Amino acid sequence: MQPDSHPGIHLTYCSNIHPGESWVATFQQLKIHVPELKLRLSKNQPFGIGLRLSADAAEQILEPGKLSEFKSWLQKENLYVFTLNGFPYGSFHRERVKDDVYKPDWRTDERYKYTARLIDILAELTPTGSEGSISTSPVSYKYWNESEASMQSVAKTGAIHLANLAHKMAMIKETQNKDIHVDLEPEPDCLIENTPETITFFQNVLIPEGTSHLASAFGISHEKAEEIIRTHIGVCFDTCHFALEYENPRESLAAFRDADIRIGKVQVSAALKVTLGDSNHRKESAERLQRFIEPVYLHQVLERRTDGTIRQYRDLPDALPHIFDEHVLEWRVHFHVPVFVGHFDGLSSTQDEIIQSLREILNGSYSRHFEVETYTWEVLPNGLKTGLTDSIERELRWVQDVLTNLKS
């Protein structure tokens, strides 16, 4: 939907909140939730969908008649798709995900072919003259590539795959006038996890390797090849992930702009935040955080220390034994909590960082695509759980209120 306060942008939620890995299951979940949300939030105007398709669902929707059926349903319900979540490749609910969420990484043909299918799907769904975004994984997971040689190899192979997809999207733009782009989503412990690492990947790997490859493979100039990559490969700015890294939104966004890196999509999400006080407070915090330990997702922890450094832990259970370290001032935990929750049972969230990020993004006109991404409803502690449709509505209304306040 396009908020009244900012009619130039598109706002929705990500359907990775719904269980279902087949296209049949995905479509059924959309039919259950989306028309009701449109009725509540955008009764007289089109309502946008942030569509998550697993690799299986992406293949199945391209079977004869499936995409046409979906397009007919969208038209009937006055709905449209402007963004896809191409990060999780396989199962994403009700079984262990953890670091499997990064598989397959960008060195593999599987990731390349999956994303190519998503491009074809989005190009079919996107109207002529419109923009479509696809968020994707941040190249690879560092724990799989602990040697420098392995890091360089996966980065280079990923760059070639991304460059080929950029050329594919450039051809779509040239022949169909549809601006499709794939946007890498930095995340803790991944090959690109913060602003400096992302810029380094673009400047030292993606642009030089991808430009040379496209120039050679397609007989175009290096200047044209670089233009294609910069137009069609960008960054998905996840407000939770950048807050986890203790990054200043203004400085981060300005750095991307200075490096000529497109912010193709914004995911509006919140992390857990814990300010650590005396030993009693730390004990209480540890007890409260126990409720957020669950077996499905990774919950990386980044701690801010008295000397200004940041230390990282691979998962929340790895971090908890260190909560009594007196040199630790604050923890931020990669657990997507509802964006409308600022404080909960003695804990807090990075809600303020969301507001700061949205202010900077809107003031700088960095992106037009905004997607609320809270996918953890099934594993949240009971005190944060409510009805799913009601919760999605409440999140989107909270974002709408923030946008209105930022406009005034």
Image (spheres, grey):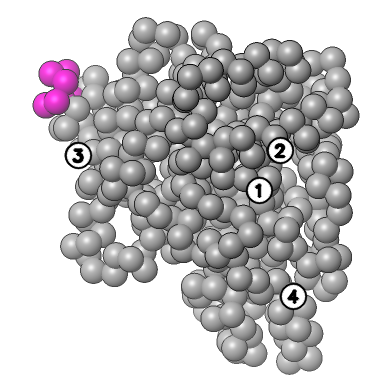
The image quadrant of residue 39 is top right
Front position in the image: 167 or 381: 381
Q: Where is residue 166 in the image (x, y as percent from the top left)?
A: 33, 28
Quadrant occupied by the N terminus: top right
Q: Distance between the residues labelled 2 and 4?
A: 28 Å
Q: At numbered mark 4, what does the secondary structure look like: helix, strand or loop?
A: helix
Q: Residues within 10 Å of mark 3 (few under 14, many from 20)?
A: some
Q: How far apart are marks 2 and 1 (CA)?
A: 8 Å
Q: Do the residues labelled 2 and 4 touch (CB within 8 Å)?
A: no
Under mark 3, the amino acid is Glu
Q: Are marks 2 and 1 in contact (CB under 8 Å)?
A: yes
Q: At numbered mark 1, what does the secondary structure look like: helix, strand or loop?
A: loop
Q: Name the residue under label 1.
A: 19
- The secondary structure that dominates the magenta segment is helix
Residue 95 visible in the snapshot: yes
Q: Where is residue 399 in the image (x, y as percent from the top left)?
A: 77, 39
Q: Are marks 3 and 2 in contact (CB under 8 Å)?
A: no
Q: Nearer the viewer, mark 2 or mark 4?
A: 2
Q: How far apart are marks 3 and 4 (CA)?
A: 45 Å
Q: Mark 2 points at which residue?
A: 29
Q: Mark 4 points at which residue?
A: 291
Asked if the stretch drawn in magenta spans residue 107, the answer is no
From what the image shows, is residue 149 above or below residue 352?
below
| Chain-order first, disc 3 or disc 1 | 1
The image quadrant of residue 230 is top left
Q: Position of residue 53 (x, y in %)?
A: 54, 38
Q: At numbered mark 3, what does the secondary structure look like: helix, strand or loop?
A: helix
Q: How crowded is mark 4: few (under 14 residues within 10 Å), some or many (20 or more)?
A: few
- Residues drawn in magenta: 215-222
From what the image shows, is residue 274 above or below residue 182?
below
Q: Which mark is residue 201?
A: none
